[in-house]
Amino acid sequence: MLKSVSIGILLVAILLAVQYSAIECGKPEAKVIPPKEITLVISSNTTSHFTPCGCSTPMGGVLRRGTAFQNIRAEVTWPLLFIDTGNVSQGATGGDQPKKDDYIFQSYALLDYDVINVGFQDIRLGYDSLENFKTTYNIPWTSCSIYPAGTTFDQPAPGTENAATNPPENVPTPSFAPYTMTDYDGFKVACMGVMLHDAAQLGAIENFTFEDYQKAIQDNVSYLRDVEKVGLIIAITDVDTYPENFDAAAVFQGVDIVIGTREPMQQSPNATLNPDNPQYNPNASRNPNSPPNQPTPADSATGSPDTAQPNSETAVENTIQYAPLPIPLTIPLAETQGKRLNRLDIWLDSDGKPFDYTYTNIGLDPSVEDDVRMAAIADGYDRDVLIGELTQQVSMAFSGSEACEECHPGFLAAWVDSPHFSSYQTIVDGAALDDRSCTGCHAVGFYHKPRLLLYENIPDIYKNVGCEGCHENGQSHINFINYLNSLPPERLSENTRTDPMAQPLQANICAKCHTGEWAEGFDSAVSLEAARQICMSVR
């Protein structure tokens, strides 16, 4: 009797479970609410440039980038992705290049990127190096089309629906994660790296096989949409221009945003319509918890723009007619050597599709301070790379004052009491030995270098402002004289080279250092004449 009751209870429980399951299966799937806004911050083609460029206005540098990232993180309270399009390294392996790359990737660990596409220059480092950077510094390499050498593609790629029906050993495994995926309260955003270079370029790369990029993209898009239910797909590439006969519509079918090429980005046609866009409304709410706009489908018969209802915080009486954005929305690469960052603030509709954006170019100029978190990394870079690199550059053009004395005896004695020749002592007296900004004008040869050395790291022959403070490029002058001395007298008339010191000094030679507070009470014409008199006295 007890056994019969137990069986009866079990049957009832099974029936109730089946009934509940049937009811649940009949319910429509709950709609995922996308975030109202998402911000992408993009860097490109760092190519091992740790320091700013040597431009007239030094731009870039990973230390400034760190500060810019921190500022953006402090501002943005909605979904935020930091993306590098690749070519972090310049791809060389000789000399000091491995040291430079190691410091670059140390800094990238602190920058904390969400995704880094494997670029054409990066892949030249080889799999072992890239894997080492990944494991040592948590570098999130991503590429859906790079496979180990010898891979064949008879079987579907992992992650695609058909792959599940094939034995695992027959499924090719990519060398890197094909994508990264971030979940924002159920709304998934996938970033997929892809190598879009033509076959001739890729054929020169050893130890890898490259899948057809269109197939690689479409296989992963299908999986992300159908299996992972991803709401927003971003494809990332490092190419400046697409390969010949490139069909972007077919290649990127199903992709929402593409980052790549250098096509200029146009202003959003909806920037002045969207009440949540600060370009339209300076008081726009950036509250990530407010609901997104609610576009209704476009009239398919007339092709009219979508109609969107603004969210409750910025409600207006009439509906807004939004122009459709290009599909996919293409964002250009950021400036090379990391000089500038690209920032894209994107507003999503209720289906998670972009309907408005603002595009900002962030210049990393000298007004952006260095990231103090990277001080130890920067000190190591100075010690192991920069000292040797800058000293070699300077030595190619500057010789130091003692070299001048060999042909111009008496000059050092004439100038020994000049404040220029004791400028190092000025640094000591001012307790400024740790101030890099002083180095450029209290030594010769290092003026306008993108990252100045600490004074203690400068070779003694370049300390103080000697002859080459005014007569720059002494080594080039010595090389010219040595060349003339090497010619037989009868061939001197054949010389076509020019002495780099043949040009008279210009008054603005002083202005490179005597500016701002250092120009107060300073008369360059008087100073140049006084210097001329000293030089003429021993000439």
Image (tube, grey):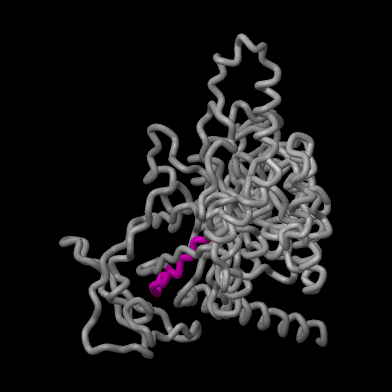
- Apparent side of residue 4 relative to residue 253 in the rendered image (left or right): right
Residue at the image position 46 percent from the left and 74 percent from the top: 37
Q: Nearer the viewer, residue 368 or 141?
A: 368
Residue 2 screen position, x and y as percent: 82, 87
Residue 183 in view:
yes
Magenta stretch: dominant secondary structure: strand
Magenta-colored span: 341-352
- Apparent side of residue 14 relative to residue 244 in the rendered image (left or right): right
Q: Residue furthest top?
A: 490
Residue at the image position 52 percent from the left and 78 percent from the top: 23
Q: Residue furthest front?
A: 537
Residue 376 screen position, x and y as percent: 81, 64
Q: What is the quadrant of the N terminus in the image?
A: bottom right
Residue 165 screen position, x and y as percent: 63, 45
Q: Nearer the viewer, residue 414 or 347?
A: 414
Residue at the image position 70 percent from the left and 51 percent from the top: 444
Residue 350 colored magenta? yes
Residue at the image position 44 percent from the left and 56 percent from the top: 331
